[in-house]
Amino acid sequence: MDQLLPRREFLKTTTGLLTGLVVAGSPLALIAPGRAWAVDLTALTSAEAATLMVGARTIAPHDKLDDAAYALVVHSVDLDATSDERVRKMIKEGIARLSTGFANSVECDRVAALKRIESSEFFQAIRLKTLQVLYATPMAYAYFGYEGEAFSKGGYVLRGFSDLRWLPEVPLEDSGSVPI
């Protein structure tokens, strides 16, 4: 006797499959084959978005930070380019100044290409947008171990002030008293 697939299993399977298909259809899904995520582009092409994503990753390199965090930078630039024609023109011209193989080149070549244009309005805008958006994402917070602002939770002194595992221990004679 054939056994029917239980409803919950069917929904779980089809939902996952449909989500994968929708995400795979996104222009940025081709750029960053990481976890499932999607960003709609309106002003930029997929190739331009790929160039911007690699540029953002070169400006602020974190090897293990998911591409989705960098995609948020691209999405923010795309929104700016959509709402302002001058910004759109500046972004497209800046991307064109980078070599066509920029997105696929090795890191030292990308750094050299960005150094050549670092005084340009395009580079400064992308650099600023990368720093503003990338480091304000929950993904970056989790990656760096940042637990968020502490004021509403009583401050840092009693909540994780000394939880920095990546710094060496300070000798007792060099540490001051902690006001409580």
Image (spheres, rainbow, N blue to C red):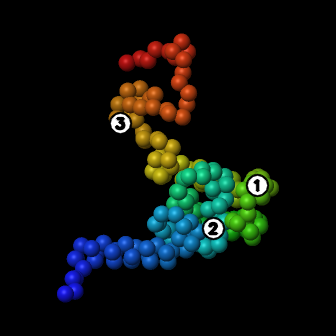
The kind of residue on which mark 1 rests is: Cys
Furthest-left residue in this view: 1
Furthest-bottom residue in this view: 1
Furthest-top residue in this view: 173
Q: Residue tagged by mark 2?
A: 50
Numbered tag placed on residue 93 in the rendering:
none
Of helix, strand and loop, which one carries label 3? helix
Q: Residue tagged by mark 1?
A: 108
Circle nearer the viewer, 1 or 2: 1
Note whether residue 79 is visible: no
Q: Residue tagged by mark 3?
A: 152
Residue at 75% across, 70% down: 100
Circle nearer the viewer, 3 or 2: 2
User: Looking at the rendering, in which quadrant would you find the N terminus?
Assistant: bottom left
Of helix, strand and loop, which one carries label 2? helix
Tell me residue 138's x, y (percent).
45, 51
Tell me residue 47's x, y (percent).
65, 72
The kind of residue on which mark 3 rests is: Ser
Q: Tell me if 70 is positioned left or right of 120 in this view.
A: left
Kindly report the distance in space between the C-alpha atoms of the residues bearing marks 1 and 3: 43 Å
Circle nearer the viewer, 1 or 3: 1
The kind of residue on which mark 2 rests is: Ala
Q: Of the residues under marks 1 and 2, which one precedes in the sequence?
A: 2
Q: Of the residues under marks 1 and 3, which one precedes in the sequence?
A: 1
| Position of 150 relative to 31 (above/below) | above
Of helix, strand and loop, which one carries label 1? helix
Tell me residue 42's x, y (percent).
55, 73
* Most foreground residue, 177 or 74: 177
* Most foreground residue, 111 or 82: 111
